[in-house]
Image: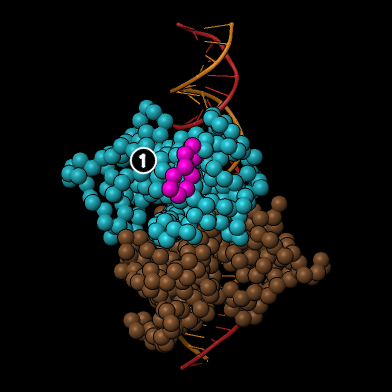
Chain colours: A cyan, B brown, C orange, D red
DNA sequence: CGGGAGGTTGATCACCATCAACAACCGTGG
DNA sequence: CCACGGTTGTTGATGGTGATCAACCTCCCG
């Protein structure tokens, strides 16, 4: 296998350095932190003293192989958690995809608050189920299905269990913002960036989506058809 | 894409029927259940009232697409948990790979016992990290690496963080038992059963493993070399 | 002995990775 | 203002890995 030694973090941190990145405010529990797009939140192998909850913005959680291959395991929108660990060390690295506000809870804080830990327990289960779905995407779907499944993530209330269906039978569009480059989408979907680009144009040529002028802007013309391609398993 | 409509559950349940499969004994918390190899533990979409902890044997957790494609998301040895849910419904199906003893906790029981739920919380985090690793396997490794990574799972204490290393420098073998058919390994690794078979013979020809006479028996001659192929990320 | 399930191996093909060229975009500095 | 380099995205040509289709083998159990 021939592996390009790709530069991993192509975005230069624009704000404060990582080590003291934007500690801002104390709350009842947890510490609020800010990260600018491209900043590192934590690194795989670091001692795992904290759980991070996204308040605003989007993070990504990923693993690296020594030869430079990267797999993005999770994409964390607000309300989602990062910082899971085995043997006391983070199993993945985490980076901000957009400017992001995050609240960090120490393990000690979690042990103290019954309410907090049960809320996080519920969210952990949610993410575990999302990972189950992600393994299906990576293991058993082709490139077009993977991209369609990915895009459906960004349409609230659609494609999931209890999908609300189209607003109107003949008007089933959506405007979404994907906060990732083609390379990041590729590393999430287990593809190359070229294949992602090609699959986008395939969907465009089928009339299912349009790419907006701004980076990351995508208009979905027919959510139901996109969902059918995605084969979410929730639609009979 | 051409999809074979495969018969999914090729093992006929040999014991009690699924509906009342082996309810056995009451304990302080939880209900002990027994399943024979091939039995269904729960089905995706069913109301999720219980969390299952494996006491003995091995379960698998998987998703199906309507066209018959299957992805095994998790393999659960003893101590591991199944029965995670979104929106109150199991997100995956679960089946016994071997005869298995399981303890089922109701959600209500979990809420009552602080000790129990914190133990399960910890195990949930462990499994979430395993799924992170699994996405790396599915998304970014080739067939040989996937198989090697898979086999390393069955060698206790090796290949993970804090690997103990070989017993003796010149004697680094292991005898493992894989409780799965080639088809099941394929559905776990996102490959076909033919490719799994081929990769096994590749490892055999390299002198790294030998297949035993019994189904599922594999002798690993050089754990460190196998680990190097697996590229676990834990070895520098 | 026969049948079925599971496994191996071979031949061929398709999807996606790879390599490469080019286009579009953006902020910078002349 | 435009030239510029850098980054990101698109498209084309080609090849390799693994899927597909098929034959055959072994083992087990009736």
Compared across the picture, whether B11 is left or right of A225 comes to right
**Element type where label 1 sits in the image:** helix
Instruction: Give residue A80's position: percent from left, percent from top.
Output: 42, 49
Residue for badge 1 = A203
Give the crowd class for mark 1: few <14, some 14-19, many >=20 residues within 10 Å.
some
Compared across the picture, whether A222 is left or right of B78 comes to left
Q: Residue at coordinates 46% horizontally, 45% vertically from top-left?
A: A103
Instruction: Give residue A231's position: percent from left, percent from top.
Output: 35, 54
Compared across the picture, whether A30 is left or right of B152 comes to left
Q: Residue at coordinates 42% horizontally, 61% vertically from top-left?
A: A114
Residue A28 in the magenta stretch? The answer is yes
Above or below for A33 versus B186: above
Q: Residue at coordinates 64% horizontally, 74% vertically from top-left?
A: B176
Span highlighted in magenta in the image: A24-33
Residue B30 in the magenta stretch? The answer is no
Above or below for A46 versus B29: above
Quadrant occupied by the C terminus of chain A: bottom left
Quadrant in the rendering for residue A5:
top right
Instruction: Give residue D28's position: percent from left, percent from top.
Output: 55, 87
Q: Main secondary structure of the magenta part?
A: strand
Above or below for C23 versus B184: above
Q: Nearer the viewer, residue D10 or A16?
A: A16
């Amino acid at each position: 296998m021939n592996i390009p030694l790709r530069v991993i973090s192509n975005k230069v941190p624009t704000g404060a350095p990582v080590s003291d990145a934007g500690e801002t405010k104390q709350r009842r529990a947890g510490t609020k932190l800010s990260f600018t797009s491209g900043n590192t939140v934590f690194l795989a192998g670091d001692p795992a003293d904290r759980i991070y909850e996204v308040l605003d913005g989007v993070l990504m959680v990923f693993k690296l192989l020594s030869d430079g291959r990267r797999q993005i395991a999770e994409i964390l929108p607000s309300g989602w958690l990062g910082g899971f660990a085995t043997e006391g060390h983070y199993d993945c690295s985490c980076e901000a995809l957009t400017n992001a506000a995050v609240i960090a809870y120490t393990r000690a804080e979690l042990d103290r608050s019954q309410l907090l830990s049960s809320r996080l327990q519920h969210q952990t289960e949610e993410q575990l189920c999302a990972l189950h779905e992600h393994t299906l995407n990576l293991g058993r779907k082709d490139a077009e299905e993977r991209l369609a499944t990915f895009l459906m993530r960004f349409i609230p209330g659609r494609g999931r269990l209890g999908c609300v269906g189209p607003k109107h039978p003949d008007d089933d569009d959506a405007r979404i913002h994907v906060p990732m480059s083609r390379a990041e989408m590729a590393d999430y979907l287990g593809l190359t960036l070229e294949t992602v680009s090609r699959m986008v144009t395939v969907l465009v040529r089928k009339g299912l989506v349009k790419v907006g002028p701004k980076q990351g802007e995508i208009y979905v013309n027919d959510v139901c058809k996109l969902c059918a391609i995605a084969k979410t398993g929730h639609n009979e």
